[in-house]
Image: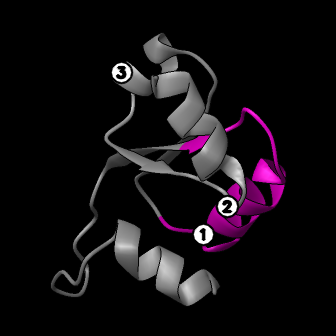
Amino acid sequence: YRLSMFRAIFPMHPPGTILHVNVGVVAIQGDFEKHLASLRATGREGLTLSEVRTPEDLARVERVILPGGESTTVGLLMQ
């Protein structure tokens, strides 16, 4: 699970390349802490992690992770 999430966030780059990226984890409900912990555990340089709770938080990230169970909540909020 961790490796597939990692590859989705960081596509393949030449060895030694440091990709700086801001990743947000939607923290409206669910177990977003585990997603953040998994990303931190990779030890990846250049990774900035944020909890996304507001539209302003979302505007500050380049990539976003929707933890399981949040897709319905997000869909309702978008309406």
Residue occupying the far top of the picture: 56
Rate crowding at label 2 as few (under 14), some (14 to 19) or many (20 or more) other CA atoms within 10 Å: some
Q: Are marks 1 and 2 in contact (CB under 8 Å)?
A: yes
Mark 3 and mark 2: Cα distance apart in space: 21 Å
Tag of residue 32: none
**Left or right placement of residue 39 versus residue 57 in this view:** right
Query: Which amino acid, mark 2?
Result: Arg
Q: Give yes or no for residue 29 being in the magenta stretch.
A: yes
**Left or right placement of residue 68 versus residue 56 in this view:** right
Query: Which amino acid, mark 3?
Result: Ala
Rendering quarter of residue 42: bottom right
Mark 3 residue element: helix
Rate crowding at label 1 as few (under 14), some (14 to 19) or many (20 or more) other CA atoms within 10 Å: few
Q: Residue at x 58, y 30 (%)?
A: 76
Mark 1 residue element: loop
Q: Nearer the viewer, residue 15 or 11?
A: 11
Region in magenta: 25-44
From the image, tell me which residue sits under label 1. 43
Query: Which amino acid, mark 1?
Result: Gly
Q: Residue at x 25, y 77 (%)?
A: 11
Q: Nearer the viewer, residue 55 or 9?
A: 55
Kindly report which numbered mark, 3 or 2, lies closer to the viewer in this rendering: 3
From the image, tell me which residue sits under label 3. 59
Give whichever of discs 3 and 2 has the lower sequence position: 2
Image coords of residue 21 (percent x, y): 34, 48
Q: Nearer the viewer, residue 3 or 47?
A: 3
From the image, tell me which residue sits under label 2. 40
